[in-house]
Image (tube, rainbow, N blue to C red):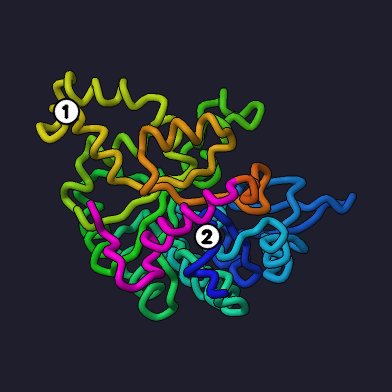
Amino acid sequence: MDSKTQGSIDIHAHVVLEEALGAAGEHGPEIGQDESGQPWFRVGGYRLDGVRYRGSAFMDADLRIAGMDRAGIDYQVLSPNPLTYFHHIDARSALAFCRRHNDAMMAHIARYPDRLGGFAALPMQDPVAAADELERAVRELGLLGAYVGTEFGTELDSEAMDPFYSSVSALNVPLFFHPAPPGIDGPAADPRLRRFDLDLICGFAADETLAVATLVYGEVLDRHPELDICVSHGGGATALLIGRMAMAAIKRPWSPPSLRSEGAFEASVRRLWFDAHVHDPRARELLEDVMGSDRLVMGTNFAGWDQGDAMKLGDGAKRLAKNARRLLRLESGIECHDN
């Protein structure tokens, strides 16, 4: 079976690559273990304790394929670990890391070309360098798109981002936004998010919601109608807040004219894509009701702490795979841009 044309496709699966360790110089990343044998992972001054990357599906392609077989996942597109976006370090070090990471990504997935694809890491603190590296990653390496954070010092709707978005459109590849835990190599988080892993539980959802709002209120897709953007975890709280966000578009003085009519905000949101990694069937039902079903794709955060169970989707996984083939340009003869 050609996994790219049948079965299930998972587009939310992070990877840690041995060859990219130390590629950002003093910023790392670095892997080690303490005196008791407990693993740690360092990025700059941040250290993650107790998560084992070596000897797991994060780094071992054979273990990943075995896990995919158990979960019923036919094809998986690997993306950078959000801990290693490096969007706030010096641009030169970030570019060096991204180039090494993208080269290593291609070598990693080349062992299983019918089961694995890859997304590019980009130095988003320098949109020009990011566009150049994406072109190299797509044209020379064969990666399927870009996978970046939601915050890197430039607003997502800034005019400074327009040349980058134009480059993504010209390459005819998708752009994925997924938050990074705050404070790793960028601004510190709200101190309330430091408890109970709230940076992951609530902080990610807030960042994703802010990304959606900025892209829509900022009319990014109006300026770049052929750009396909996918936001992780169902776009955070967008489905829940859609009515309030739409009311603001109609009533608030800063809202652009294009969003002031009834239904305009909702229609703009539906031009985005979302991965359906939302953990609860009620949330999934709301997401599909608000966003529609033709722009949803399957995501599992494979091997992560909140890994979803692809088998629970049943026939739904195959339906989402059809969407993923459109988004990833894996099927000839299909119009990929229907904005």
Q: Residues within 10 Å of mark 2 (few under 14, many from 20)?
A: many
Q: Is residue 278 left or right of residue 49?
A: left
Q: Residues within 10 Å of mark 1 (few under 14, many from 20)?
A: some
Residue 206 makes an appearance in the image: no
**Where does the image place residue 159, in percent across and percent down from the top left?**
19, 49
Front position in the image: 182 or 149: 149
**Where does the image place residue 283, in percent across and percent down from the top left?**
51, 31
The residue wearing badge 1 is 255
Q: Residue at x 52, y 72 (%)?
A: 100
Q: Name the amino acid, label 2.
A: Ile
Q: Name the amino acid, label 1.
A: Ser
Q: Residue at x 89, y 50 (%)?
A: 36
> In which quadrant of the rendered view does residue 258 lie?
top left
Which element is circle 1 on? loop
**Where does the image place residue 313, in percent across and percent down from the top left?**
58, 47
Mark 2 and mark 1: Cα distance apart in space: 37 Å
Q: Is residue 222 magenta?
A: no
Front position in the image: 110 or 31: 110
Point out the frontmost of discs 2 and 1.
2
> In which quadrant of the rendered view does residue 195 lie?
top right
Residue 218 vertical position relative to residue 126 in the rendered view, above or below? above
Q: Which residues are magenta?
A: 313-339
The residue wearing badge 2 is 9
Task: Compare marks 2 and 1 and give the one earlier in the sequence.
Answer: 2
> In which quadrant of the rendered view does residue 10 lie?
bottom right
Residue 214 vertical position relative to residue 196 in the rendered view, above or below? below
Q: Is residue 170 left or right of residue 97?
A: left
